[in-house]
Image (spheres, helix red, strand yellow):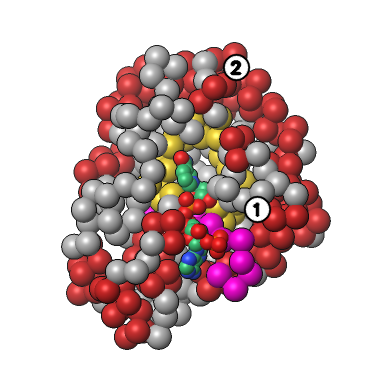
Amino acid sequence: MAIQNLQDTVLLHNGVRMPGFGLGVFRVKDGDEVINSVRTALANGYRMIDTAAIYGNEQGVGQALRESGVPRNQVFVTSKVWNADQGYDSTLRAYDESLKRLDMEYLDLFLIHWPVKGKYVETWKALVQLYDDKRVRAIGVSNFHIHHLNDIMDATSVVPVIDQVELHPLLSQIELRAFCKEQAIQMEAWSPLMKGNLDIPVLHDIAKHHKKTPAQVVLRWHIQHEIVVIPKSIHEQRIIENSLVFDFALTQEEMAQINALNQNQRFGSDPDNFNF
Ligand code: NDP
């Protein structure tokens, strides 16, 4: 069932509950910018933050969380091991370094950021070790196609709880979603707002009908598909706007109209062809 509010959770296959809605902080500067974004989100009911080592803002995320007064165990914190740190030992070290920057004792979710060729299976083994050692509550991946998922599952028999991928109306990831459903892997959408490219007539028409914004319509579309979303904004007004998506519902026909926008169009890199 679709989540009903900002704090509502989805059940991951290892029994951990994860909020279905959070704040993304890619390209948010460490220091005041990230501190203000995270503080604003938490003050307005968000209970999940998605960061990564490569974002360079884990320190600010940790500081904002501590200063917010919201207990650590009520916020779901995700970070990711960066490509340059992949491999078994270096991933274990990267986890410790992320924790140190965040000044936290554990992460709720640690992800492999991208499937680096020749390295991601060893990286996955390190995540499994961290999980077995109870140092992290859940482990998953990001930017994995079906063949990447099969590789790590074949090598370890451990199924990631999450695949966080680019996913929005122009790239609806039909095949991957079907595969993940079969495997009980929860889908999480990055760039859910198409990086702000929301000027699509169908979205405007539906938004007008509900007295909502195109951003809210797109996030509602994800929620009704039971996809976890982590929209990013550094502006208070938008952080709040993005969260006001629980007081209306898209009809089946509107869902179908948005589904029909799919063009397999990426704003980011293809996981089979990236050079970073
Ligand atoms: P989003 O799709 O969330 O879009 C963010 C952009 O949209 C920003 O320019 C923001 O501007 C603007 N925006 C936010 N809210 C609104 C609104 N209501 N109306 C109009 N424009 C709006 O893009 P991201 O790429 O940031 O993706 C979200 C998160 O996903 C990231 O922050 C990160 O946590 C994660 N991610 C993960 C990746 C991975 O490889 N695993 C890759 C990319 C992202 P402004 O801030 O100025 O308001």
Q: Quadrant of residue 224?
A: bottom left
Q: Nearer the viewer, mark 2 or mark 1?
A: 2
Give the SS element for disc 2: helix
Q: Which sits in the foreground, 215 or 121?
A: 215
Image x and y of residue 268, in percent: 38, 43
Task: Let me know if residue 248 is in the magenta part.
Answer: no
Residue at 25 percent across and 73 percent down: it is 202
Tag 1: residue type? Val
Q: Quadrant of residue 151?
A: top left
Q: Nearer the viewer, residue 47 or 166?
A: 166
Identify which residue is drawn at 52% across, 16% down. 87
Q: Secondary structure at mark 1?
A: loop
For residue 138, the mark is none
Q: Residues within 10 Å of mark 1 (few under 14, many from 20)?
A: some
Q: Is residue 262 left or right of residue 214?
A: left
Q: Is mark 2 within 8 Å of ligand 1?
A: no
Q: Is residue 76 above or below residue 36?
A: above
Q: Using the numbered discs, state the Cα–Cα distance from disc 2 to disc 1 in whole angstroms.
A: 27 Å
- Residue 72 or 64: which is nearer the viewer? 64
Measured as percent of width and height from the top left, residue 210 is found at 36, 84
The amino acid on which the numbered mark 2 sits, given as a three-letter code, is Ser
Q: Which residue is mark 1?
A: 75
